[in-house]
Amino acid sequence: MNRLIIKGGRVIDPSQGIDKISDIFIEKGKIKAVEENISIENAEIIDASGKIVTPGLIDIHVHLREPGFEAKEDIESGSMSAAAGGFTSVACMPNTNPPADNKSVVEFITEKAKRVGLVNVYPIGAISKGLKGEELSEIGDMKHSGIVGISDDGEPVMNSNLMRRALEYSSMFELPVISHCEDLNMSGEGVINEGLTSTILGMTGIPATAEEIMAARDIRIAEFTGGKLHIAHVSTKGCVELIRQAKAKGINVTAEATPHHFTLTDESVKTFDTNTKVNPPLRTAEDVEAVRQGLKDGTIDAIVTDHAPHTIEDKEVEYDYASFGISGLETSLPLVITYLVNTGILTLSQAIEKMTINPANIINVPKGTLKPGSDADITIIDIEKSITVDTKKFKSKGKNSPFNGWELKGSVAMTIKSGNIVYKNNGD
Ligand code: DOR
């Protein structure tokens, strides 16, 4: 498809401050023009009237599980899931087997993702060899192979000096250090937020402080080194406040939050549904409100899924033994529309900004915009459509979602990557 016109949609592109009914002309996979009433010969027409048209959504925190954990997800199923969720670009975490701590694993991921070809996949390299938190991995080598950040996500970097070196070294390559903030000595064997609910249920808790002391430490190290710090999956009121203060001081820090942390509280664990088991854990109503306010006032820059697919066997066990994680790519956008936009916490444009240009800027990739000359990565959204989440229909291998059966507003109508339709909602 050489020439394509997306006609009559409400085009929202926060990177350019655009919010108007417009057409988009695409040629050879690139955006050529965003204007009213475009008419070009021999162009295929997509009617987007009544729909929202945005830059392709970007999720900078997903687990694609390949290599090593293909029973949970692989690059192909994860890409299909991303496209169905409206995402044209994802950044994948290195906690695979072997971990993405060297250039050959990074190259394997990029090559496989290119062969699948559905979405752009940007690998994140491990901070430490084997994700063991002991020795820095080959960061320069991996940068040359295409990593867009470094993280030991799933595990914190407990050694403060290693975190210092990571922040110093990565800044030479302009890579963000994405920090999974958790003091392992304090979180211990915890499986749920520590508080009233954990006490009532008699379950071992993970205190908010376990996240906050590591966020405070990493902010302090970022200030000391000048490195670029990105705080992953912010879940507590105290963590939001630490980031707010750090930004006010001009420290080089950005942050992200997940849909589950701005919609669910630890009360949902009372069902003992292991799909509510996630790390960091679901917190209290006060924390959920603080995350929402952090999104509203710009303390939290990006919305990410932390898409963490698991097998049925990983989840159909006692709560204590279940794996942490939620399969999130296919419910993110409707959760954002229902709980942030339709409640007036964010405008539609602010929500899209946190799912397009802001995450693109954090990982420093030329995406998240409809500027002429950019790759034609586009998402068409039906914000009025009501949906009922049905995990059986997920493209992801991971059916582990606490949102199964939820009635939400908003649906992806079409996902376009480099001018090619990679997902079309046929209403099934
Ligand atoms: O719930 C989670 N699952 N949190 C993490 O940090 C890691 C992830 C996983 O890899 O399953």
Image (cartoon, grey):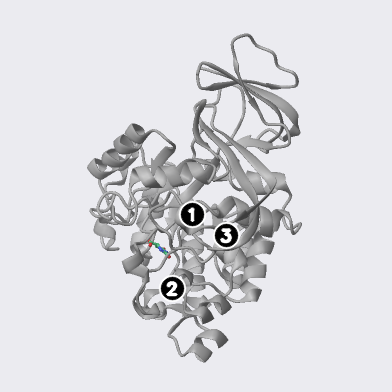
- Residue type, numbered disc 1: Leu
**Which residue occupies the foreground of this view, 220 or 396?**
396
Local SS, label 1: strand
Alpha carbon distance from label 2 to label 3: 17 Å
N-terminal-most mark, 2 or 3: 3
Residue 148: tell me if it is visible: no
Alpha carbon distance from label 1 to label 2: 31 Å
The residue that mark 3 highlights is: 259
Whether residue 384 sits left or right of residue 301 in the image: it is right
- Residue type, numbered disc 2: Thr
Whether residue 375 sits left or right of residue 50 in the image: it is left
The residue that mark 1 highlights is: 229
- Tag 2 near tag 3, CB within 8 Å: no
- Mark 2 surroundings: few (<14), some (14-19) or many (≥20) residues within 10 A: many
Q: Nearer the viewer, mark 2 or mark 3?
A: 2
The residue that mark 2 highlights is: 274
N-terminal-most mark, 3 or 1: 1
- Tag 3 near tag 1, CB within 8 Å: no
Whether residue 337 sits left or right of residue 206 in the image: it is right
Residue at mark 2: C-beta within 8 A of ligand 1: no
Q: Nearer the viewer, mark 1 or mark 2?
A: 2
